[in-house]
Image (cartoon, grey):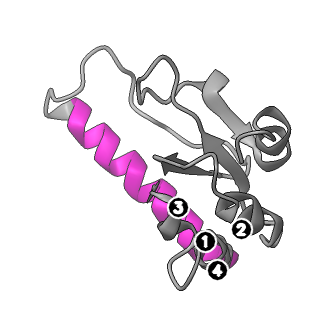
Amino acid sequence: MKFLDNALAGNAGLKQHVEDIEKFLGNCNNLSNIKNEMKAVFNQKIELGLIDNQKPIESFSDNKPEYILALINHDTASSILKRELEDLSPLTQAELKFAVSNFLGYGLYDQCIYSLDAFLKQFEDRV
């Protein structure tokens, strides 16, 4: 999550986050460890009765993970976002996506998640 346009650039900006996740996921044990931990946590919550009406997770798909960025309070008059997006290196270890809120909400729905290319195309006049 990035809040306001000043958070998009610099040492903790979009470029650094993308480089960090690429490096992190490049270690083959990291993704496997995350999947195993999430499976254990989710299944434990079912056993404790904290999650109802769900079956335990047995495994995850082999698809690349989605690295979803939520950009909060972006000023559409600013050129920072476009500049930073154009400077991103492509990810090989994950799919880079962007969450867009819908109807003034922050629900994370599949139809509001865009790849980098689709995001730039859909919102070219606001990036």
Q: Main secondary structure of the magenta part?
A: helix
Q: Say whether residue 56 is left or right of residue 103.
A: left
> Within 10 angstroms of label 2, few (less than 14), some, or many (20 or more) residues?
some
Q: CA distance from mark 3 to mark 4?
A: 31 Å
Q: Which residue does the numbered mark 2 point to in the structure image? A: 84
Please rate how many residues cluster around mark 1, counting C-alpha atoms within 10 Å: few if below 14, some from 14 to 19, many from 20: some
Tell me which residue sits at (50%, 78%) in the image.
12
Callout 4: helix, strand or loop? loop
Q: Of the residues shown, which amino acid type is indicated by label 4?
A: Asn
Relative side of 57 to 16, left or right: left
Q: Nearer the viewer, mark 1 or mark 3?
A: 3
For the residue marked with disc 1, what is the amino acid?
A: Ile
According to the picture, the residue beneath numbered tag 3 turns out to be 5
Pinpoint residue 2: horizontal percent, then vertical percent. 47, 58
Q: Residue 42's spot in the image, x, y percent? A: 33, 40
Dot 3 or dot 4: first in sequence order is 3
**Considering only order in the chain, which callout, 3 or 1, is on the residue closer to the N terminus?**
3
Circles 1, 3 touching at the beta carbon (< 8 Å): no
The residue carrying mark 1 is: 21
Mark 4 is surrounded, within 10 Å at the Cα level, by few (under 14), some (14 to 19) or many (20 or more) other residues, namely: few
Where does the magenta region start and end? 24-46
In the picture of the structure, the residue carrying the numbered disc 4 is 27
Judged by depth in the image, the label closer to the viewer, 2 or 3, is 3
Q: Magenta stretch: residue 9 in it?
A: no
